[in-house]
Amino acid sequence: MPAPGSPRLPWESVPADIRAIVDERLGSPVVRAVSQDGGFSPGAAARLWCADGTTAFAKAVSLGQNTGTPLLHRTEARIAAQLPASAPVPRFRFAHDDGDWVVLAFDASPGRLPPLPWTFQAATRVASAVRRLSAQLTPCPVADVRSAGTLLADDLTTWTRLADDPPGDLDPWELRNLGRLSEVGERLLGPGSGLDGDTLLHLDLRADNILLEPSGRVVFVDWPWACRGAAWIDLVLFALDPMVYGGIDPQGLVDAGGGLGGGEPAAVTGLLLGLAGMWALASRQPMPPGMPTLRAHQRRFHDAALAWGRRRAGWD
């Protein structure tokens, strides 16, 4: 099964003047570039080999490909520059930003994406690494990041907007429970939110953002959605990926590693149902430029979050 994602821009199609800047910053000209699979950015993402034998990983995107992606690259550059050296992430090398093209360069990891479909063994290996990652990033080492509640506020209240004009093809269970679903986000984002915490969260843990190194080390890449919140959130979000791309029961995966620690059951269920609403709306939007597979991907995650959240809610 190929890694989910959109077609990537070949490194050779990045403008020559931008590639020349990368050569200069790397200290040696790039003589070989291999595009990397996975992810929904329409920009380039490539492993680079330089004339002096050194390697790097770089990604580049322009406003002409997708207006939102350069903003994500800028955010990632700010976050990546502040991640502790002990964290299981590739070392950030540099960023180039000319207002149109944004390029990020990192050390090249020897790791590869987890093979899909997920196996339970591989998923439990990564779930254990996610737990260790959360422990390493508590307290939050980055000062200027938003809280999970702030970042997700619009997404977790999507059911309220959907209830005003419900799509005709909503799941029957969703239609029957629109009133309850509309209350989920407000409760979750209220005072004493179960999302609160002092862990730096990745918030986008999927197979295409994870590298398995030959040494056994699990490395986490692509941090533009990083935020501060409760440590259990990343584990819940990760558990959806093996469900979507492997049919692995997410509750069983979480329980196999000892559960969700301090995650309040109502908050976990609320997050899942709130995200199902976000994906219910997003998957019905027009296709964004350069991302022809994104809406189907969002639909699959909607179905997974809804199934898990519905089972936990017990509203049937």
Image: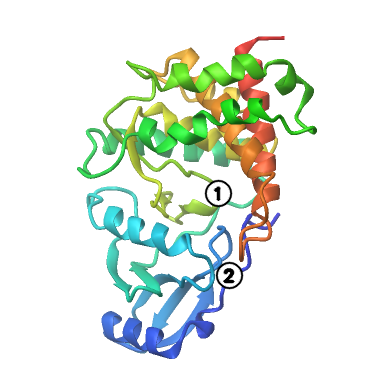
Q: Eyeballing the image, is 314 above or below 295?
A: above
**Image spot of residue 4 (x, y percent):** 64, 54
| Image side of residue 102 versus residue 144, left or right | right
Q: Quadrant of the C terminus?
A: top right
Can residue 259 be seen?
no
Residue at 34% across, 79% down: 54
Q: Eyeballing the image, is 189 above or below 44?
A: above
Work out whether mark 2 precedes mark 1 in sequence or the reverse, and give the earlier one: 2
Q: Residues within 10 Å of mark 2 (few under 14, many from 20)?
A: many
Location of residue 282 by image quarter: top right
Which residue in the structure is indicated by mark 1? 207
Q: Eyeballing the image, is 9 above or below 239?
A: below
Location of residue 134 by image quarter: top left
Residue at 63% across, 67% down: 7
Residue at 36% across, 19% down: 193
Look at label 2 and name its amino acid. Answer: Arg
Camera-side mark, 2 or 1: 2
For label 1, the SS is helix
Which residue in the structure is indicated by mark 2? 8
For label 2, the SS is loop
Can residue 190 be seen?
yes
Q: Eyeballing the image, is 127 above or below 291?
A: above
Q: Residues within 10 Å of mark 1 (few under 14, many from 20)?
A: many
- Front residue of 78 and 70: 70
